[in-house]
């Protein structure tokens, strides 16, 4: 069988598809991916078959002005604008044009798309193919999907198709990577199957040589997109340096490390460190609440302090706090409040026990191979 996996051109959207792609390849299927640059080139560099489809990651810059305008509205209103205006209004058309050609040329048997990629259901319907939707976090709220559906409807009609509810999102199968304690009740509306999409926790990982400082170890990250504010990094580091034995911060490309100012020896600043090599040695995490980071930390049983900035981060932070496995701090946070939240996350207390419960739930999720079996049944 041929499986085409499609995603927006960001690591947080491509990443959840890769365990499924690997499991499908291990079962003998021919797997290809389709996304924009620079993710497409990175995937090809890793030896994967990948078609370039749609605009690159820089397409988000066309929406940059709206991000500032939406800063004061409710999180669901803001997220609906992202889905309708960016994911559909800017990205869907160019990606759909490429997907039509890829489907005609490569002839897949089934499409698997990330939950924010709305071209795949149209391309699949036009070709008479089934498709599965892969989540990257909590179920997308109905209000957000309705906004995406209104924006996507003209693209369905241009393709000669009647628009589907929710723009085809989870119309056939939804693969859910969130543990039950973090997922919302809305998932019950869909034909859903749970699946573990976080990397397996290594039994005996190798400790990085530079990470030789004392415990507790705090990891600070704001992901690969929402990482452009040096002031936020500085505020966290000022609080963390007082209560953590070792602090590791990854800035990504969004912040010059020199902008963080001089730091004591127990604070390590890096542009990037693979989370799989770092999380096994951490005690707690301070982050933005992006789904990939949040799930990765949860898979290791780590309490988290979430400082959300956009996208699904407010939802994720609230769900984590409700589960008792972390704290969410919004707006301008007083230094004493931030320091107290970090100290609580580093302690051996209720947050840690709830985080360990999340880890156990993630461990119990079905393996990617089980989800591939569901995709096989869908294609059959």
Image (cartoon, rainbow, N blue to C red):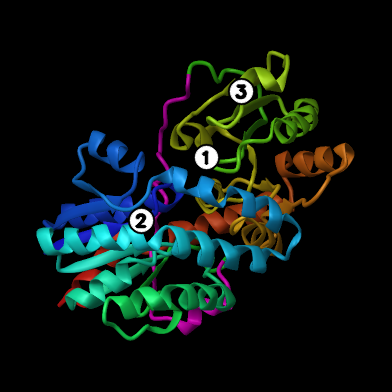
Residue 314 makes an appearance in the image: yes
Q: CA distance from mark 1 to mark 2?
A: 16 Å
Q: Is residue 361 above or below residue 204?
A: below
- Find residue 333 and report its horizontal and vertical position in percent: 83, 44
Disc number at residue 294? Answer: none
Q: Quadrant of residue 315?
A: bottom right
In three-dimensional space, the C-alpha distance between marks 3 and 1, rounded to whole angstroms, equals 14 Å
> 170 above or below 7?
below
Residue at label 3?
A: 256
Q: Nearer the viewer, residue 357 or 339?
A: 339
Q: Residue at x 30, y 66 (%)?
A: 371
- Residue 80 is situated, as x and y percent measured from the top left of the image, at 58, 68
Residue matched to label 2: 7
Residue 166: x and y, percent?
Answer: 45, 79
Q: Earlier in the sequence, mark 3 or mark 2?
A: 2
Q: What residue is disc 1 on?
A: 224
Position of 188 relative to 337 (above/below):
below
Q: Residue at x 50, y 59 (%)?
A: 86
Considering the numbered disc 2 on the image, is that residue within a helix, a strand or a loop? Answer: loop
Mark 1 residue crowding within 10 angstroms, few (<14) / some (14–19) / many (20+): some
Q: Which residue sits at x=36%, y=68%?
A: 133
Q: Residues within 10 Å of mark 3 (few under 14, many from 20)?
A: some
Q: Cα distance, mark 3 to mark 2?
A: 29 Å
Q: Quadrant of the N terminus?
A: bottom left
Q: Magenta segment range?
A: 183-208
Label 1: which secondary element: loop
Badge 2 density bin: few <14, some 14–19, many ≥20, Cα 10 Å: many
Q: CB atoms at circles 3 and 2 under 8 Å apart?
A: no
């Amino acid at each position: 069988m041929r499986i085409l996996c499609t995603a927006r051109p960001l690591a947080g959207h491509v990443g959840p598809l890769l365990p499924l792609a690997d499991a499908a390849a291990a079962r003998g299927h021919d797997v290809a991916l389709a996304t924009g640059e620079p993710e497409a080139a990175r995937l090809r560099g890793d030896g994967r078959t990948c078609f370039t489809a749609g605009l690159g990651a820089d397409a988000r810059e066309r929406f940059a002005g709206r991000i500032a305008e939406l800063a004061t509205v409710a999180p669901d209103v803001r997220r609906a604008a992202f889905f309708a205006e960016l994911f559909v209004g800017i990205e869907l058309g160019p990606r759909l044009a490429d997907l039509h050609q890829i489907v005609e040329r490569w002839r897949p048997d089934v499409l698997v798309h990330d939950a924010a990629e709305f071209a795949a259901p149209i391309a699949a319907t036009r070709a008479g193919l089934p498709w599965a939707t892969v989540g990257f976090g909590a179920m997308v709220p109905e209000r957000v999907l309705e906004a995406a559906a209104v924006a996507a409807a003209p693209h369905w009609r241009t393709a000669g198709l009647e628009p589907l509810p929710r723009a085809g999102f989870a119309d056939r199968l939804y693969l859910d990577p969130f543990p039950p304690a973090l997922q919302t009740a809305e998932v019950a509306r869909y034909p859903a199957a749970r699946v573990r999409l976080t990397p397996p926790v290594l039994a005996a990982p190798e400790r990085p040589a530079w990470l030789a400082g004392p415990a507790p170890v705090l990891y600070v990250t704001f992901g690969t997109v929402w990482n452009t504010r040096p002031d936020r990094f500085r505020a966290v580091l000022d609080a963390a340096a007082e209560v953590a034995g070792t602090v590791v911060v990854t800035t990504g490309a969004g912040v010059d490390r020199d902008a963080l100012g001089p730091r004591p020896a127990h604070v390590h600043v890096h542009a990037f460190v693979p989370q799989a090599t770092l999380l096994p040695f951490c005690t707690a995490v301070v982050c933005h609440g992006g789904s990939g980071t949040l799930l990765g930390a949860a898979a290791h049983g780590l309490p988290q302090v979430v400082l959300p900035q956009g996208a699904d981060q407010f939802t994720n932070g609230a769900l984590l706090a409700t589960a008792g496995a972390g704290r969410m701090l919004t707006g301008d946070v007083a230094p004493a409040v931030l320091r107290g939240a970090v100290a609580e996350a580093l302690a051996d207390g209720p947050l840690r026990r709830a985080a360990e419960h999340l880890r156990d739930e993630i461990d119990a999720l079905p393996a990617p191979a089980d989800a591939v079996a569901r995709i096989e049944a869908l294609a059959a």
